[in-house]
Image (cartoon, rainbow, N blue to C red):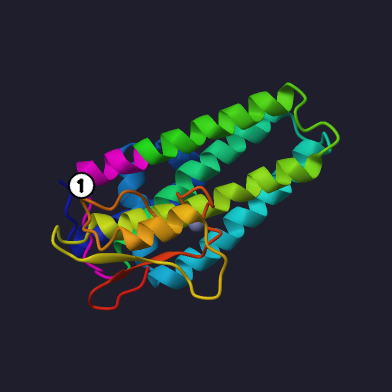
Amino acid sequence: MMKMNREVAGLITFILETVPSSQLIQKWGSTLFYSTVLSLQRNYPAVRSFKSLEKDFRDYFQKQTTLLTTNQVVANNWFSDLRDRIHLDSTRAYLSGSLYEDRKVTFNTSMQDEIERRVGEQTSYLASFRDEFNAGKYKGTPSKALWRAGLYASFLAVMFRAGWIAKQAEDTVIFWRVTPGKEHCGECLELEMGGPYTRKTLPKLPGEATCRGNCGCYLETKQGKKV
Ligand SMILES: [Zn+2]
């Protein structure tokens, strides 16, 4: 369990400003990495910081994947670059979500395990993307590769919600909501009807259903907090 007081947070801000992000990335999974990213996120209002993070992340994936499909970057470099980006930005999204409702800095091993499990899954999808690209799957269809790259942006929203949920009490009542006026997939409608849930019973997060967030679903607590 890692709890930080103001002095420690100040020290971490100092480390953050002096450790280049390339070195920070190499320490992914270490206490230094998490405490530094946490300190970075707590300096910004959670939602505004998340929205700009999500936009930059989406733009970066599109840009790098355009370079890949036009043979301006080799697939292995594309992969390691985007993998690092997933490591850093997913962690930022998760920690941003954890500070959304409650600015108190909390970070524990189960949060760390969750980040590493979720990011590990995405990294293996990215590796299959690379392997399929190398096998010629996207030859002549660069728009399909770009579409696939776009799916990663919805993963950041999943991480934000996962971070928010990690700090909810076990008895917080959580509703799955579909956005009125949007087209809904069957799975999201079922998830809405299956509720309400708690942190422990919620089967998945908006963005993880087969529509990948296309339904515009969100979570809402009994108190009206929407995430
Ligand atoms: Zn859906």
Q: Identify the residue at image location x=28%, y=38%.
A: 113
The x and y percentages for residue 204 are 36, 49
Q: Identify the residue at image location x=19%, y=57%.
A: 4
The x and y percentages for residue 87 are 46, 42
Q: Is residue 206 visible?
A: no
77 over 103 or under it: above or below: above
Which residue is more in the foreground, 85 or 110? 110
Q: Identify the residue at image location x=33%, y=46%.
A: 34
Tell me: 155 left or right of 145. left
Inspect the magenta stretch and tell me whether residue 168 lies in it.
no
Tell me: 216 left or right of 58. left
Magenta span: 101-116
All told, the count of numbered labels is 1
**Residue at the farthest top position:** 135
Q: Residues within 10 Å of mark 1 (few under 14, many from 20)?
A: few
Quadrant for the C terminus in the image: bottom left
* Residue that label 1 marks: 108
Residue type at mark 1? Asn
Which residue is more in the foreground, 51 or 85? 51
Q: Secondary structure at mark 1?
A: loop
Which residue is more in the foreground, 48 or 137? 137
79 over 214 or under it: above or below: above
Q: Identify the residue at image location x=35%, y=73%.
A: 226
The x and y percentages for residue 119 are 43, 39
Inspect the magenta stretch and tell me whether residue 105 lies in it.
yes
The x and y percentages for residue 188 are 44, 57
